[in-house]
């Protein structure tokens, strides 16, 4: 029996975190090294090691893979001198942000008052960016082999992959299986859009758990059509309308209010329940907006804001648009004071989600605490993670609603999301063959479970507990 597995390779990784936060490969030579090393590991070591092994024994297979990977890491570490290790780190961060300078104080007017909001007259030095941890070349072999073994086991047992993953997570029989709620990216006004606005990398539709997958996708398609219709009118002075890398409408705006008004007006036209059964999450991707020479975030081109000024901006937007119930990466992870301040001013009205700011390190590195106020973490199936690693990283967040980013790769990630029991699955926009394949896979699973009468309602979990206060929340895949 032959089974294939597809995962994101280092070529999908960007050091600024836009594609795969926390990953550190940046050059084609490193990408080539990682892929060739992974192939060598698979053909020369892992294939002989797993020969004759029972593929349905996922836990022991994954332990074997993890032990092999740790041994390779220790060998790699021992072979490097201190100088060579420093050179490797410097190469891995060649495209990372420069170290921060002091944040200049806001200019004063003639009366001695601050021009900035709320009197931010004295600002602390900007914390420097953390040095990314380089990934060990060949790490992709671990995730790919683990996934291929899981697919093989599912075929041998004549059951869908999501059922097999569920049995690995919870060996006891499941009478009901809830589905993750799809998070749909409907609009992008980030750095790659033609307008001045950089802040709204993704505007994401977050339905309630009571809505079915097919219903949610239908609403998302309707909403995007209505947004296009509204944009064609004279009320909005927007730049050219395109499609973002995430498969959403990409529009150039000058201010965040224009983008949010577009979404609000379009939902009102369609009588969609925005603010109740439909909520909004904003992926700010602030780690990519920092101008280190100024010590400010370039949220709008030509109008940089200090971290404290950005707190004020978020507070105003959440007050004006109460449908915004989640902010993803509103700051760099290093701006701890601002995470704490924002969490205190928004209270229970909005939760803070960490993606690039979640400090996801390779398994051999020490996990660092999450920024203050973080209530959710977006998990990813990284290339050096076994199936067991992914399940563990999700189950450790048992007291909060969990999220998984589908990323690139095949539809297996949808089965992994269903089987691992995550609350939300971030799938991107409703354009592009790869993404639509994943949406279709999720609808197919929903239909299967409905026909069998075991589609369960998702249990409502407390989404606003501060994960940064619990040691186990700092998940290390």
Image (cartoon, rainbow, N blue to C red):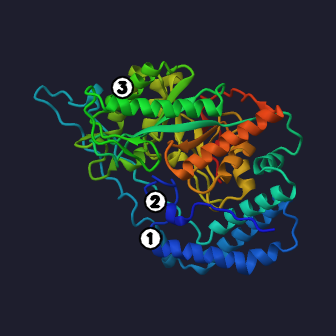
Is disc 1 placed on a helix, strand or loop?
Answer: loop
Is disc 3 placed on a helix, strand or loop?
Answer: helix
Is disc 2 placed on a helix, strand or loop?
Answer: loop
| Residue, disc 2 | 14
Question: Looking at the rendering, which quadrant does residue 421 occupy?
Answer: top right
Q: Quadrant for the N terminus, please.
A: bottom right
| Residue, disc 3 | 261
Of badges 3 and 1, the one in the foreground is: 3
Earlier in the chain: of badge 2 and badge 3, it is 2
Image point 55% across, 47% down: which residue? 358
Question: Looking at the rendering, which quadrant does residue 320 occupy?
Answer: top left
Question: Looking at the rendering, which quadrant does residue 306 occupy?
Answer: top left
| Residue, disc 1 | 27
- Front position in the image: 366 or 263: 263
Q: Residue 337: percent from the left, percent from the top?
A: 44, 37
Image point 47% across, 25% down: which residue? 346
Is the Cβ of the residue at disc 2 closer than 8 Å to that at disc 1?
no
- Front position in the image: 75 or 264: 264
Q: Residue 249: percent from the left, percent from the top?
A: 41, 40
Mark 2 and mark 1: Cα distance apart in space: 10 Å
Mark 2 and mark 3: Cα distance apart in space: 31 Å
- Front position in the image: 97 or 388: 388
Q: Tell me if residue 243 can be seen.
A: yes
């Amino acid at each position: 029996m032959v089974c294939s597995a597809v995962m994101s390779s280092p070529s999908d990784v960007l050091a600024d975190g836009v594609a795969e936060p926390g990953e550190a490969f940046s050059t084609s030579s490193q990408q080539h090294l990682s892929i060739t090393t992974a192939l060598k590991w698979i053909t020369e070591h892992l294939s002989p090691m797993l020969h004759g092994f029972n593929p349905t024994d996922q836990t022991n297979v994954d332990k074997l893979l993890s032990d092999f990977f740790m041994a390779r890491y220790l060998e790699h570490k021992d072979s490097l001198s201190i100088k060579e290790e420093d050179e490797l780190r410097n190469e891995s961060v060649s495209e990372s942000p420069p170290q921060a300078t002091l944040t200049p104080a806001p200019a004063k007017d003639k009366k001695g008052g601050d021009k900035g909001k709320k009197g931010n007259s004295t600002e602390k030095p900007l914390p420097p960016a953390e040095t990314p941890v380089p990934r060990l070349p060949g790490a992709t072999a671990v995730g790919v082999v683990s996934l291929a073994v899981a697919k093989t086991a599912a075929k041998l047992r004549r059951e869908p992959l999501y059922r097999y993953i569920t049995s690995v997570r919870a060996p006891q029989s499941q009478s009901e299986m809830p589905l993750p709620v799809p998070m749909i990216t409907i609009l992008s006004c980030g750095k790659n859009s033609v307008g001045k606005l950089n802040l709204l990398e993704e505007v994401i539709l977050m339905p309630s758990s009571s809505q079915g997958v097919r219903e949610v996708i239908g609403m998302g398609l309707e909403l995007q059509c209505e947004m296009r219709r509204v944009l064609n009118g004279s009320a909005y002075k927007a730049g050219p309308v395109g499609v973002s890398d995430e498969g959403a409408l990409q529009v150039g705006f000058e201010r965040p209010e224009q983008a949010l008004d577009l979404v609000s007006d379009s939902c009102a036209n369609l009588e969609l329940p925005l603010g109740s059964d439909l909520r909004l999450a904003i992926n700010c991707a602030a780690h990519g907006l920092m101008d280190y020479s100024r010590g400010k975030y370039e949220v709008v081109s030509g109008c940089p804001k200090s971290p404290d000024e950005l707190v004020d901006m978020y507070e105003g937007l959440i007050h004006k648009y109460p449908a915004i119930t989640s902010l993803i990466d509103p700051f760099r992870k290093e701006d701890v004071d601002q995470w704490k301040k924002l969490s205190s001013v928004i209270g229970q009205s909005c939760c803070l989600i960490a993606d690039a700011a979640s400090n996801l390190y390779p398994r051999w590195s020490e996990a660092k605490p999450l920024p203050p106020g973080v209530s959710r973490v977006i998990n990813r199936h990284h290339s050096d993670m076994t199936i067991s690693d992914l399940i563990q990283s999700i189950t450790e967040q048992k007291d909060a609603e969990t999220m998984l980013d589908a990323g690139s790769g095949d539809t297996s990630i949808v089965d992994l999301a269903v089987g691992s029991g995550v609350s939300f699955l971030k799938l991107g926009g409703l354009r592009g063959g790869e993404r639509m394949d994943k949406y279709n896979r999720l609808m197919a699973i929903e239909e299967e479970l409905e026909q069998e009468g075991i589609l369960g309602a998702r249990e409502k979990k407390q989404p606003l507990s501060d994960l940064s206060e619990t040691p186990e929340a700092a998940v290390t895949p």
